[in-house]
Amino acid sequence: MSFSSFLIENGWDKDSQSVKYSKGNWNLTYDTSAWIEVGTIRNPRVFDVPVPEKDKEQWTLNLIVHLCEADDKIHSK
């Protein structure tokens, strides 16, 4: 299963006009290489993570969620 399919299966929505996924205020954008830009509505580029290798999809998704939740906590104070 591709990471894109894995994201959709885990509640992320795909923007049909670009290689972008969103879930609430969180955003993922594939850049032109093998990296994903992780961002939020308040911070469009929290971190870059590599596109996961096979069998690392859940680990990568957990990292993305952790990064987005941390950004949410920073901005909720």
Image (spheres, grey):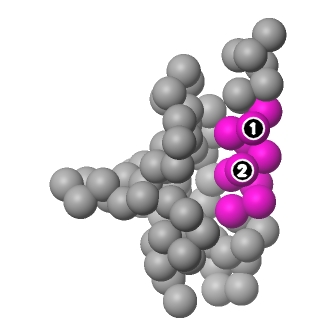
Q: Position of residue 33 (x, y in %)?
A: 42, 59
Q: Position of residue 37 (x, y in %)?
A: 51, 45
Name the kind of residue labelled 1 in the image: Glu
Q: Position of residue 27 (x, y in %)?
A: 49, 43
Above or below residue 37? Residue 58 is below
For the residues labelled 2 and 1, say whether their Cβ atoms are less than 8 Å apart.
Answer: yes
- 74 part of magenta stretch: no
Q: Residue 9, which numbered label? A: none
The residue closer to the viewer here, 33 or 56, is 56
Above or below residue 8? Residue 45 is above
Image quarter where the C terminus lies is top right
* Residue 33 shown left or right of residue 15 in the figure: right
Above or below residue 67? Residue 20 is below
Q: Position of residue 57 (x, y in %)?
A: 67, 75
Q: Secondary structure at mark 2?
A: helix
Name the residue beneath numbered marker 1: 69
Q: Which residues are magenta?
A: 61-70
Name the residue beneath numbered marker 2: 65
Which residue is depicted at the point 71% across and 16% down? 75
Which residue is depicted at the point 42% across and 59% down? 13
Q: Dot 1, crowdedness within 10 Å: few (<14), some or many (≥20)?
A: some
Magenta part, dominant SS? helix
Name the kind of residue labelled 2 in the image: Val
Q: Dot 2, crowdedness within 10 Å: few (<14), some or many (≥20)?
A: few
